[in-house]
Image (cartoon, helix red, strand yellow):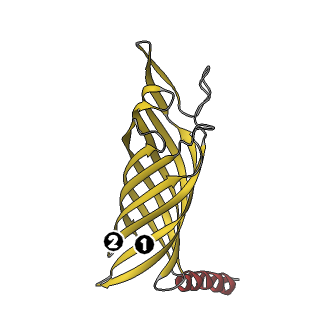
């Protein structure tokens, strides 16, 4: 019995080493806005989470992650007057990546692929006839229907790997309307610091 358990454990570690799986954590800043709404100002938020990388070769890999991402806009926004809109998402990007070595365990990594996200929270703060109003970003409140919770789109990024430290930038372009029949979608740029292990 002990030999079988030992064999299974050895096989697991051998497969993990062969498949070149690595893990990472990252945190950073989001600068987000809405498309088709030039009157709104960008909003600064946060982005934090963890991911893995499955390497097919020294160059090609796939990088799925699970992130908590804060987005939104402020100022004169689509059909809502002057407001600050906070959108908190649970986000899952799955990016294909190409790694180019610069020597001394340093690399440049270029990535692109789809992302999906689900709105899990947020508040809209606005003034209505001089009265401050606060409602749930994604929930229905009176005449307000709430933003669509589901978001998906395309992402692309570049990262510098300095040993185990990763400095990255990623941009996202949403393809799902936040408000039905509006052509308004999320767009954002994030700057991240990560650690590989």
Please name the residue that numbered disc 1 is placed on. Answer: 110
The residue most toward the left is 104
Name the image quarter holding residue 192: bottom left
Nearer the observer, 193 or 152: 152
Please name the residue that numbered disc 2 is placed on. Answer: 160
At mark 2, the secondary structure is: strand
Tell which circle, 2 or 1, labels the residue nearer the N-terminal end. 1
Q: Residues within 10 Å of mark 2 (few under 14, many from 20)?
A: some
Give x and y (percent) for residue 128: 46, 16
Residue 100 tag number: none
Relative to 38, is 144 on the left or the right?
right
Give x and y (percent) for residue 130: 40, 12
Nearer the observer, 9 or 105: 105
Q: CA distance from mark 2 to mark 1?
A: 9 Å
Q: Quadrant of the C terminus?
A: bottom left
At mark 1, the secondary structure is: strand
Give x and y (percent) for residue 162: 30, 74
In the picture shown, does residue 61 fall above or below 130? below
Give x and y (percent) for residue 77: 45, 32
Q: Between label 2 and label 1, give the one nearer the viewer.
A: 1
In the picture shown, does residue 195 fall above or below 171? below
């Amino acid at each position: 019995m002990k030999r079988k358990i030992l064999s299974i454990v050895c096989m697991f570690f051998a497969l993990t080493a062969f498949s070149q799986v690595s893990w990472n954590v990252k945190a950073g800043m989001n600068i987000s806005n809405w498309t088709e709404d030039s009157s709104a100002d960008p909003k600064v938020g946060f982005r934090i989470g963890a991911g893995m990388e499955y390497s097919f070769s020294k160059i090609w890999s796939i990088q799925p992650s699970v992130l908590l991402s804060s987005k939104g806009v402020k100022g004169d926004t689509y059909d809502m007057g002057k407001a600050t809109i906070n959108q908190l998402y649970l986000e899952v990007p799955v990016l294909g990546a190409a790694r180019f070595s610069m020597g001394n365990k340093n690399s440049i990594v270029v990535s692109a692929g789809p992302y999906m996200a689900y709105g899990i929270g947020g508040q809209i703060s606005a003034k209505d006839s001089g009265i401050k109003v606060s409602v749930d970003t994604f929930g229905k409140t009176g005449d307000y229907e709430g933003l669509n919770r589901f978001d998906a789109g395309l992402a692309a990024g570049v990262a510098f790997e300095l040993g185990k430290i990763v400095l990255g930038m990623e941009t996202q372009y949403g393809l799902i309307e936040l408000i039905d029949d509006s052509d308004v979608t999320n767009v954002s740029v994030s700057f991240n610091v990560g650690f590989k292990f």
